[in-house]
Image (spheres, rainbow, N blue to C red):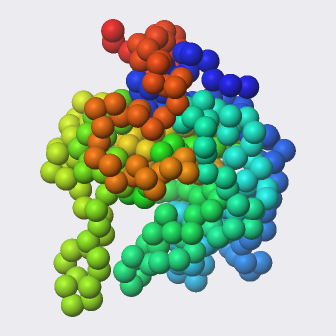
Amino acid sequence: MSLTNEQISFFKDQGYLRIRGVMDTQLCAEALFCMWNALPPNSRLKRDQPSTHIGPFTDDERSTDSLHIRNGYLWQWRAAGTSDLLINLIYSRTITTMAQTLLGEGLRVPVVGGTPMGSRGSAWPGGPTDPAQGNEGARGIYFTLPYGNKAREPDRAHTDGHPFQLGIVGLLSDVPVDGGAFKVWPGSHKRLYPTFQMQYDQPRIPYYSHLPSHKGIVHSEAYLDELARLHEDTQAVECSGRTGDVVFWHHRTAHMAGHNYTSVIRQAVLADFWKTELDQYRCDPPQANMWRDWSQAINTADPTAYSDDFAASQGLKLNR
Ligand SMILES: [Fe+2]
């Protein structure tokens, strides 16, 4: 299964592409089985008791291990990212072919048994590990627990700081509306890409314990302004759906992990794609052609060549 011209055009124009039923549902079930089995045996959470699924994790259940985080409403098992199972699931031949249609030949190959994301390099004491360090597989399995009676919060978009080119989120179980699905801001990739100093990377301020006020990723003024405008003028698309559905998204697409106001856990697998040449072109400034490093198919695609019905099937209502 490869992508249609309409799918390629839509991705080029809107910076995301949802595709139904791409992942093997049997492997999805196996991934969930392994995730639940990775919990300590004395955990309060029981898979067959939905009333125990409501977050947040209590103090005695919290884990800040960057390979298996259970904190607040997040349960992220990154150690699974280089397992045979997860790599077969999210880097399947079908999905890899689709990614290759967008990016072109020369994709980096994930390593079964390699080092998973989060293995090395805490950015500062108690801070996040650098997601680019040691990421030889998928990002891992990411759950969002139901918020229970937590007050509703506004949506806040961001872009990811670590270098890659194409992201994917796959649903391991059905995710209803308002259930914590990945949210994207359509068209944001075209608006944000030029505001960076580097195509696929961005500057960081090192952490110094005696100079603690500034640390981590640096955003340009232009980026912050554009992100603020996106919040004002663009309606996010919520990628809820069924087991096996995926969404591809461009590295510079504004997004967020949705809030989970339902009573079911959001269960997903996240992964990144990039070409082996990423190290050569990650620090180049934004190009006049933002697709310079992508496939011929995407370079020649007409970004208007998709129908209103197709957009609607992607959760996007067009006024054109
Ligand atoms: Fe993100």
Residue 57 visible: no
In the image, is 81 to the left or to the right of 194? right
Residue toward you, 90 or 199: 199
Instruction: Tell me if residue 111 comes above or below residue 22 in the rendering.
Output: below
- Residue lying at 70% horizontally and 46% vertically, measured from the top left: 91
Tell me what residue is drawn at x 27 percent, y 89 percent. 209
Query: Is residue 67 found left or right of 226 in the rendered image?
Result: right
Q: Position of residue 52 (x, y in %)?
A: 66, 64
**Front in this rendered view, residue 104 or 39:** 104
Residue 122 showing in the rendered view = yes
Residue 187 drawn above or below residue 317: below
Q: Which percent across, then down, holds residue 59?
A: 53, 81
Measuring from the top left, give residue 314's x and y in whole percent: 52, 24
Q: Residue furthest bottom?
A: 210
Q: How many marks?
A: 0
Q: In this rendering, is residue 81 above or below 124?
A: above
Q: Nearer the viewer, residue 300 or 203?
A: 300
41, above or below 136, in the image: below
Which of the image's four quarters has the N terminus? Answer: top right
| Quadrant of the rendering where the C terminus is positioned | top left
Find residue 15 and report its horizontal and vertical position in percent: 43, 32
Quarter of image, res 193: top left
Horizontal placement of 96 versus 64: left or right? right
Q: Quadrant of residue 212?
A: bottom left
**Residue in the image at 55% along x and 51% along y:** 276
In the visual, does 165 lie left or right of 86? left
**Front position in the image: 210 or 185:** 210
